[in-house]
Image (tube, rainbow, N blue to C red):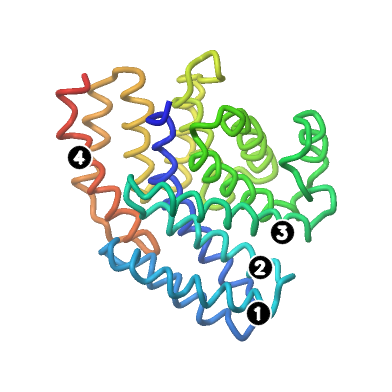
Amino acid sequence: MARFFSFFRPLLLGVAMFYLTGCAMLMSSVTAELGENLSKALLNQTDPQTVRVGIPSYLLLQEALLQQQPDNQALLLATATLQRAYASLLAEDENTRLSLLSDKAFSLSQRAACLQKKAFCDVKQLTYPEFEKILHASDAADLPVLYDLGASWALWIQAHKTDWNAIAQLAQVKAIMQQVIKQQADYQHGSAHLYLAVLASLLPPAMGGDLANAKQHFEQVLQLSPQNLSIKVLYAKHYARMSFDRPLHDRLLTEVLASSVQAEDLILINSVAQQQAKALLSSGDSYF
């Protein structure tokens, strides 16, 4: 089962970095410029290791600011997003740190959601019908906190992937992303489509897997964010491999390697995507 949930790290980096820029722009005037400049620096960095080393210092700064502004919703969202971005750059064997980051991110996201509406407080304790009811009552104003909550929840599930009770909560993540699309399909460059695409191609049919649905979501997010090379990597890794479509698999990855990483606010994401594409291509013969 553990291998099924390895998708969250590459997925989280792609969507977290998009979201971090938006969060930085919403913070107080004192921290907004610093946050925006940092976001730009991260997004346009070609060396993932440099970003990994640098993120903790800024996380400490944001957590210090939260001590002074515990009810600053934008700061809560930005800090949760940075926690997820940092988690995406961890090595596969750093499970203890991943667990700590996921707990922090989910706690921050819950606090931000609770500030938005009392109905969103303690969502993890709600039954699924209760959760579905408050989710369907949400509107466009709730979109940022709902998306952030879903992303942090996904990370938390990955960190607790050996617990079947945690895995069962993927239904809530899926419902959140469906609601995001219902409210605004292109929100955060269509990232909700990417979550749903990977989820649909990740799980067995008995748990809700649906390759046809996955392909539809992958194609939709490619149209919304064609310069994001991580989409094609995830498309190859989760759809093409699951459907044993070697020609599609190799075509997508070859296109990634032939593409330039130079795209505004996508350099880091694309650099990581090319590393992953090279590894997937080299392992193709042993998989197919």
Residue 1 image offset from top left, x and y in percent: 43, 25
- Residue at 47%, 26% (x, y): give it: 214
Disc 1/disc 3 C-alpha distance (Å): 18 Å
Q: Which residue is the site of mark 1?
A: 28
Of pointers 4 and 3, the one earlier in the residue sequence: 3
Q: Secondary structure at mark 1?
A: loop
Q: CA distance from mark 4 to mark 2?
A: 37 Å
Whichever of labels 4 and 2 marks the residue nearer the N terminus, that label is 2
- Residue at (61%, 78%) from the top-left corner? 65
For marks 2 and 1 on the same chain, the one whose residue lies earlier in the sequence: 1
User: Residue at label 4?
Assistant: 279
Residue 158, horizontal then vertical, whole percent:
49, 40
The crowding category of the residue bearing disc 3, from other C-alpha atoms within 10 Å (few below 14, some 14 to 19, many at least 20), is: many
Three-letter code for the amino acid on which mark 1 is drawn: Ser
Residues 247 and 162: in front is 162
Callout 2–callout 1 Cβ contact below 8 Å: yes
Q: Give the answer, above or below, for where 110 lies relative to 73.
A: above
State the separation of the CA atoms marked 2 and 1. Answer: 8 Å
Q: Secondary structure at mark 2?
A: helix
Mark 4–mark 3 Cα distance, whole angstroms, equals: 39 Å
Q: Say whether disc 1 or disc 3 marks the residue closer to the N-terminus.
A: 1
Please name the amino acid that badge 3 sits on.
Arg
The residue located at (79%, 50%) in the rendering is 121
Residue ID for mark 3: 111
Residue 119 lies left or right of residue 3; in this view the side is right
Residue type at numbered disc 4: Ala
In the rendered image, which residue does mark 2 sit on?
74
The x and y percentages for residue 47 are: 26, 64
Quarter of the rendering containing residue 31: bottom right
Q: Viewer-nearest of labels 4 and 3?
A: 3
**Extreme-top residue of the structure:** 206
